[in-house]
Amino acid sequence: MTIHIPTALQSYSGQQRELSLEGTTVGEVLLSLDHCYPGIRFRIIDEQDRIRPHIRMFVNDVQAPHLHVPVAPDEHLYIICALSGG
């Protein structure tokens, strides 16, 4: 599956915008991502294994509300970060 890394997290992914990773669920794909780039998963997932409130994930064009959403090798996972500031 192709995972798209937002600009705000690219400092944790070696400046990679797009990666091909394996997994059958969103959670497994994020574990694969963390294997390649240790620590990035914690920026996306909290201590209770829930998606952080300021993060949205989409499998193709459908929002993934939890980590158990199934994914296929030909799909795309988009990670979206809310931005704030003044």
Image (cartoon, helix red, strand yellow):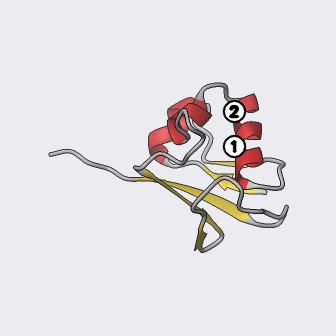
Identified at 21% across, 45% down, the residue is 85
Identified at 79% across, 57% down, the residue is 1
How crowded pointer 1 is (Cα within 10 Å; few <14, some 14-19, many 20+) is rated as: many
Q: Position of residue 71 (x, y in %)?
A: 78, 62
Residue nearer the viewer, 8 or 66: 66
The residue under label 1 is 30
In the rendered image of this protein, does residue 21 appear above or below residue 37? below
Direction from residue 24 to residue 14 in the image, left or right:
left
Direction from residue 11 to residue 59 in the image, left or right:
right
* Corner quadrant of residue 61: bottom right
Residue ranking furthest to the left: 86
Tell me which amino acid carries mark 1.
Answer: Leu
Pointers 2 and 1 in contact (CB under 8 A)? yes
Q: Which mark is residue 34?
A: 2
In the rendered image of this protein, does residue 35 appear above or below residue 67? above
User: CA gap, disc 2 to disc 1?
Assistant: 6 Å
